[in-house]
Amino acid sequence: MAKKQGTSSSKSKKQRESLKEEKKSEGVASKLSKQQEALKEGRFSRKAIERKLGEYRRILTLTRRPTREEFSTIAKVAALGIILIGAVGFLIYLAMVQVPASLSANNTTQATANTSTSSEQTVIQQINNATANSTVTSATKTTNTTAQSIAS
């Protein structure tokens, strides 16, 4: 292939590709060396703290104060998110606390109805037994008093 006119390249394509690869490998090596330096320095060394503060400073220089419209939009979205999360939390509360309580109340009511009929039967039985016992006891007393009066 013939070279295009107007472009002069002193390096061949292979040389340019090898230079690109070298730059990439240097970039990776420099990144690794920075990470390794950070590990060697420790978390709270002076250099690590200065580096982190430099990152924060860079971010703060890029930021700007929001306009009134941007702020109101952000506030609305945040309020909507808080309300949505609160509603979901309330629904979970209802599902976990109120629904089982109402179901157990219905079961208790049904069990109480069944228990009340059996307890009513028990009370009726006790009354009948007491009446029968008192009748037997009074009959025994009457017999004893009759026998004593005859004996006297």
Image (cartoon, rainbow, N blue to C red):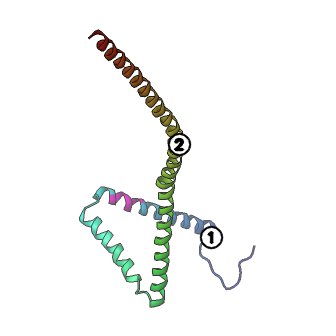
Q: Which is in the foreground here, disc 1 or disc 2?
A: 2
Compared across the picture, whether 21 is left or right of 46 comes to right
Prevailing SS of the magenta stretch? helix
Q: Are marks 1 and 2 in contact (CB under 8 Å)?
A: no
Q: Position of residue 79 (x, y in %)?
A: 46, 76
Q: Is residue 7 above or below residue 96?
A: below
Q: Position of residue 85 (x, y in %)?
A: 48, 66
Circle number at residue 113? 2
Give the residue at the far left of this rendering: 46
Write the residue at 62% across / 70% down: 12
Using the numbered discs, state the Cα–Cα distance from disc 1 to disc 2 in whole angstroms: 98 Å
Give the residue at the far bottom of this rendering: 68
Q: Is residue 142 above or below residue 5?
A: above
Q: Quadrant of the rendered structure where residue 141 is?
A: top left
User: Which element type, helix, strand or loop, lies under badge 1?
Assistant: loop
**Magenta stretch?**
32-38
Write the residue at 36% across / 15% down: 143
Write the residue at 59% across / 69% down: 16
> Which residue matches tag 1?
12
User: Which element type, helix, strand or loop, lies under badge 2?
Assistant: helix
Q: Decide which of 63, 68 is in the foreground and name it.
A: 68
Disc 2 crowd rating (10 Å Cα; few below 14, some 14-19, many 20+) is: few
Report the amino acid beneath label 2: Ala
Give the residue at the far top of this rendering: 151
Write the residue at 62% across / 77% down: 9
Report the amino acid beneath label 1: Ser
Quadrant of the image containing the C terminus = top left
